[in-house]
């Protein structure tokens, strides 16, 4: 059985964690398949965006706990790579959270650029409830996305967020009915995939870099080089000509 299913439609690649009997918990073999899938997507010029989801009923119920009392930095790092590989991707990434996203599974969702949640989603950090400190950059990602209060409420106070609550606190961009999730996520991702691939990659990196930019003049300077680069690309002339043609017909 493949622990990861892949599909490419309309330039949108979908990566589906596929171990439903264990609620898609992350194991070393699954991580190997995630890495291979992401390598293939990034090597394929026909892929413009990636959707990450899970075979129902769960998105990802965390790491396969095993014997954590004997864990080492190296063994934890193997599991971390399952979500870190996706978080490092230059391609636009979208988490379609269809069910429980727990611990490392929540890290998988947090590592994506955008989160669309089913109203049946359950985002649950659960680290403290298991008696273990958060790991994998969980608190850093959570705080940067939703702010310190939401991070405290979930991590320290054990608040579990459904899709609507995740949207309310800014952890998810949108909550949609469960039956509509994958169609909505695909259409959402297709808008990113319709842009020139390298342009989307450059724009994503610019947004990430802006976290370290402190003022407007520096932001203008950061954007200037890639903007000038984009005006010299063949797609710019093609798209500008198509726009002008549409305008002239009105």
Image (tube, helix red, strand yellow):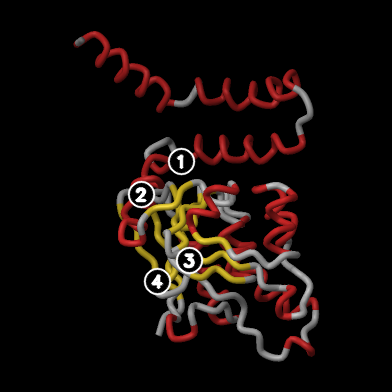
Q: Pinpoint residue 235: horizontal percent, then vertical percent.
A: 40, 27
* Residue placed most toward the observer, 104 or 6: 104
Q: Earlier in the sequence, mark 2 or mark 3?
A: 2
Q: Nearer the viewer, mark 1 or mark 4?
A: 4
In whole angstroms, how far apart are the C-alphas of marks 3 and 1?
A: 18 Å
- Answer yes or no: do the residues labelled 2 and 4 have beta carbons within 8 Å? no
Which residue is identified by label 4? 5
- Dot 4: element: strand
Q: Quadrant of residue 28?
A: bottom right
Residue 197 got which mark? 1
Q: Looking at this view, name the residue that lies furthest to the left.
A: 249
- Answer yes or no: do the residues labelled 3 and 1 have beta carbons within 8 Å? no
Crowd rating for badge 1 (residues with CA inside 10 Å; few <14, some 14–19, many 20+): some
Residue 11 got which mark? 2
Q: Answer above or below: position of 32 versus 243.
A: below
Q: Answer above or below: position of 25 versus 6.
A: below
In whole angstroms, how far apart are the C-alphas of marks 1 and 4?
A: 23 Å
Q: Residue at the location (50% across, 20% down)?
A: 231
Q: Earlier in the sequence, mark 2 or mark 4?
A: 4
In whole angstroms, how far apart are the C-alphas of marks 1 and 2?
A: 10 Å
- Answer yes or no: do the residues labelled 2 and 3 have beta carbons within 8 Å? no
Crowd rating for badge 3 (residues with CA inside 10 Å; few <14, some 14–19, many 20+): many
In whole angstroms, how far apart are the C-alphas of marks 2 and 3?
A: 15 Å
Which residue is identified by label 3? 37
Pick the quarter of the image with the C terminus.
Answer: top left
Q: Earlier in the sequence, mark 4 or mark 3?
A: 4
Q: Pinpoint residue 51: horizontal percent, then vertical percent.
A: 44, 56
- Dot 1: element: helix
Q: Pinpoint residue 99: horizontal percent, then vertical percent.
A: 46, 68
In whole angstroms, how far apart are the C-alphas of marks 4 and 3?
A: 9 Å
């Amino acid at each position: 059985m493949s622990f990861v299913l892949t599909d490419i439609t309309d330039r949108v690649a979908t990566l589906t964690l596929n171990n439903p009997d264990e609620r898609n918990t992350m194991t070393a073999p699954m991580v190997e398949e995630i890495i291979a899938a992401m390598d293939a997507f990034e090597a394929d010029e026909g892929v413009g965006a990636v959707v990450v989801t899970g075979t129902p009923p769960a998105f990802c119920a965390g790491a396969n706990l095993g014997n954590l009392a004997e864990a080492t930095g190296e063994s934890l790092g193997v599991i971390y790579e399952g979500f870190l590989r996706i978080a490092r991707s230059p391609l636009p990434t979208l988490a379609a959270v269809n069910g429980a996203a727990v611990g490392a599974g929540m890290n998988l969702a947090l590592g994506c650029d955008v989160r669309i949640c089913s109203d049946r989603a359950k985002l649950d950090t659960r680290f403290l409830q298991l008696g273990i400190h958060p790991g994998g950059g969980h608190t850093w990602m959570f705080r940067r996305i939703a702010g310190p209060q939401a991070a405290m409420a979930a991590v320290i106070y054990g608040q579990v967020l459904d899709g609507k609550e995740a949207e309310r606190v800014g952890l998810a961009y949108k909550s949609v009915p469960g039956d509509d999730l994958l169609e909505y996520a695909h259409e959402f991702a297709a808008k990113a995939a319709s842009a020139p691939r390298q342009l989307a990659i450059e724009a994503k990196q610019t947004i990430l870099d802006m976290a370290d930019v402190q003022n407007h003049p520096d932001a203008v300077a950061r954007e200037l080089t890639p903007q000038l680069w984009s005006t010299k690309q063949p797609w710019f002339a093609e798209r500008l000509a198509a726009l002008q043609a549409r305008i002239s017909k009105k």
